[in-house]
């Protein structure tokens, strides 16, 4: 097991969300879970931790110890099955049954403790049981810490389609405890890097349209340099990299809490990525599928004369440096009919078209509402096969 270092200070990132009466509070640092007692006045005395067996075996005692410091706290735990089929009706009902059996009230709190699927499912349960319980997200993966746990999007899969049932419900507290990354396999760390790279490719658009401020060097330049430094969980820059992603996403959510405009840019690479994830679930995890989706988005942009070959080469090299896939293996193939079936379930579709996030001629800028018909997408896909 790794031992991440250089993360002794706990950083607070708070941002107000329009149309809500409070703010999203984020704690980040090594051991951030221990600070939960500082916020206990915002929560009831009962806590239900939703997690999975592997996470529970490694880290549940650590989180429970922090919660037990809250006077008169009552802590319950629900371990859901490990595996890819998590965000379904059966597991949602298991959460409802546990809440009811333990007489949870609206003042009590659910804690999502795990990866992105856990935060998605738990957030949905919290938003719907008694029309809304307190919610704390404690993500344990890099992808969860920089993306899935932030922003209030919750969802269930339905009949093989990803996140087609969902709510937007903000957690009152998000704890980014870097300690939990110690058990993360290298493949999962790399998967999180795909989302981090995505942020670097939309940074200037976010800076222009929100209160997020770019640094003296672009995030893309920073990541390019790190890609040659064996960047991993022990790297001293990891906390700063995560914080930068959080600032981008939090400012985007503050500007567009209900996912109507600028927040769409966060979907760069995801329309294609979700298709690859669905078609080749045994071969690609979410981050790996997003990596492929980013390549396809850049090539689609080039196909539509929105960017250039040099950009494609730059992005391909960066993804490769972080050990992410940039093309389908020869043994993986699909028909347009199968591809289109998944694509048509995309939540960004309208009656006659789908809105794509397309990179523009400058890295960091995107058009996040580029409408394309299925026939246009089909013509592009056929150039790729």
Image (cartoon, rainbow, N blue to C red):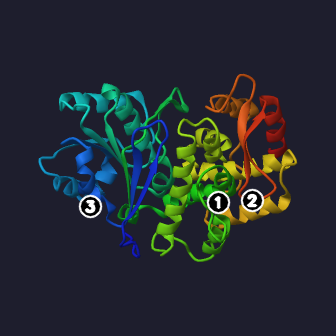
The quarter of the rendered structure image containing the C terminus is: top right
Mark positioned earlier in the residue sequence (3 or 1): 3
Q: Are marks 1 and 2 in contact (CB under 8 Å)?
A: yes
Give the secondary structure at mark 1.
helix
Give the secondary structure at mark 2.
loop
| Location of residue 280 by image quarter | top right
Q: Which mark is residue 200?
A: 1
Front residue of 155/184: it is 155
Residue displayed at 44% across by 43% down: 117
Image: 218 above or below 326: below
Q: Decide: few, some or many residues near mark 3? Use Cα within 10 Å; few <14, some 14-19, many ≥20.
A: some
Residue 334 showing in the rendered view: no
Q: Decide: few, some or many residues near mark 2? Use Cα within 10 Å; few <14, some 14-19, many ≥20.
A: some
Residue displayed at 41% across by 33% down: 124
Residue displayed at 33% across by 52% down: 54
Residue under circle 3? 34
Horizontal arrangement in the rendering, residue 151 relative to residue 317 (left or right)? left
Q: Decide: few, some or many residues near mark 1? Use Cα within 10 Å; few <14, some 14-19, many ≥20.
A: many
Give the Cα separation between the discs numbered 2 and 3. Answer: 39 Å
> Residue 215: where, in percent of width, then height?
62, 68
Mark positioned earlier in the residue sequence (2 or 3): 3
Horizontal arrangement in the rendering, residue 301 relative to residue 79 (left or right)? right
> Residue 305: where, in percent of width, then height?
88, 48
Give the Cα separation between the discs numbered 1 and 2. Answer: 8 Å
Residue under circle 2? 363
Mark positioned earlier in the residue sequence (1 or 2): 1
Residue 201 showing in the rendered view: yes
> Residue 262: where, in percent of width, then height?
64, 43
Give the secondary structure at mark 3.
helix
Residue farthest toward the right in the current orientation of the protein: 305
């Amino acid at each position: 097991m790794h031992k991440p270092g250089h993360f002794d200070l706990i950083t607070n990132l708070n941002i107000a969300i329009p149309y809500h009466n409070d703010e999203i509070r984020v704690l980040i640092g090594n051991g951030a879970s221990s600070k939960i007692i500082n916020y206990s006045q915002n929560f009831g005395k009962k806590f239900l931790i939703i997690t999975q067996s592997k996470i529970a075996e490694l880290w549940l005692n650590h989180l429970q110890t922090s919660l037990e410091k809250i006077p008169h706290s009552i802590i319950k735990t629900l371990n859901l099955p490990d595996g890819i089929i998590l965000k379904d009706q059966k597991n949602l009902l298991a959460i409802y049954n546990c809440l009811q059996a333990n007489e949870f009230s609206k003042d009590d709190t659910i804690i999502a403790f795990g990866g992105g699927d856990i935060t998605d499912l738990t957030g949905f349960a919290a938003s719907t049981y008694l029309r809304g319980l307190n919610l704390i997200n404690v993500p344990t993966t890099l992808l969860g810490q920089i993306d899935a746990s932030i922003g209030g999007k919750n969802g269930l899969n339905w009949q093989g389609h990803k996140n087609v049932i969902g709510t937007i419900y903000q957690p009152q507290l998000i704890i980014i405890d870097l300690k939990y990354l110690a058990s993360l396999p290298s493949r999962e760390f790399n998967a999180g890097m795909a989302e981090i790279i995505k942020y670097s490719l939309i940074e200037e658009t976010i800076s222009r349209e929100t209160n997020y401020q770019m640094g003296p060097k672009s995030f893309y330049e920073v990541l390019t340099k790190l890609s040659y430094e064996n960047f991993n969980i022990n790297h001293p820059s990891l906390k700063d990299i995560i914080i930068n992603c959080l600032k981008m996403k939090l400012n985007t959510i503050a500007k567009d809490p209900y996912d109507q405009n600028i927040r769409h840019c966060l979907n760069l690479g995801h329309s294609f990525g979700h298709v690859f994830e669905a078609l080749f679930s045994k071969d690609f995890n979410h981050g790996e599928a997003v990596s492929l989706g980013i390549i396809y988005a850049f090539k689609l942009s080039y196909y539509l004369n929105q960017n250039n070959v040099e950009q494609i080469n730059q992005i391909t090299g960066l993804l490769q440096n972080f050990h992410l896939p940039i093309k389908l293996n020869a043994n993986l193939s699909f028909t347009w009919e199968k591809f289109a079936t998944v694509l048509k379930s995309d939540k960004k579709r309208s009656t006659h078209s789908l809105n794509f996030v397309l990179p523009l001629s400058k890295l960091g800028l995107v058009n996040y509402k580029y409408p394309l018909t299925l026939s246009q997408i089909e013509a592009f896909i056929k150039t790729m096969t």
